[in-house]
Image (spheres, helix red, strand yellow):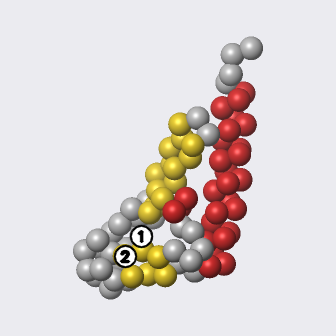
Amino acid sequence: MLRIDISAYQEDLAIIIRPRCPKCKKEFMLNLKNYYPGKQHACWACGTVTQFDTALAEKTQKQVKDLETLVHEIFERFQPE
Ligand SMILES: [Zn+2]
């Protein structure tokens, strides 16, 4: 099951997903903002390192930024006159 948590305080957006380690299958939390090109994730349980896909990470960063801009605009609509 795909579980995603999205929260926003002002324009600071957090999109948390819970993938599983490819080796030990333990679930971990990943903020998409931390899904950067050239970065990797080390499993807290078994230490298996998963390299982030560069093209996918670039796409993720762009989309998160776009969504953050959108959320910021929505917040602005609720500003007092
Ligand atoms: Zn693991």
- Residue 9: x and y, percent? 53, 37
The residue pinned by badge 1 equals 19
Quick one: label 2 or label 1, which is nearer the N terminus? Answer: 1
**Vertical placement of 32 versus 75: above or below?**
below
- Residue 73: x and y, percent? 72, 37
Kindly tell me whether mark 1's CB lies below 8 Å from ligand 1. no
Residue lying farthest to the front in this orientation: 38
- Residue 23: x and y, percent? 32, 85
Residue that appears at 48% across and 59% down: 31
Residue that appears at 51% across and 62% down: 34
What is the count of numbered marks? Answer: 2
Position of 8 compared to 2: left or right?
A: right
Position of 10 compared to 24: left or right?
A: right
Position of 2 compared to 62: left or right?
A: left
Q: Amino acid at mark 1?
A: Pro
- One can see residue 71 in this view: yes
Q: Amino acid at mark 2?
A: Ala
- Residue 16: x and y, percent? 47, 56
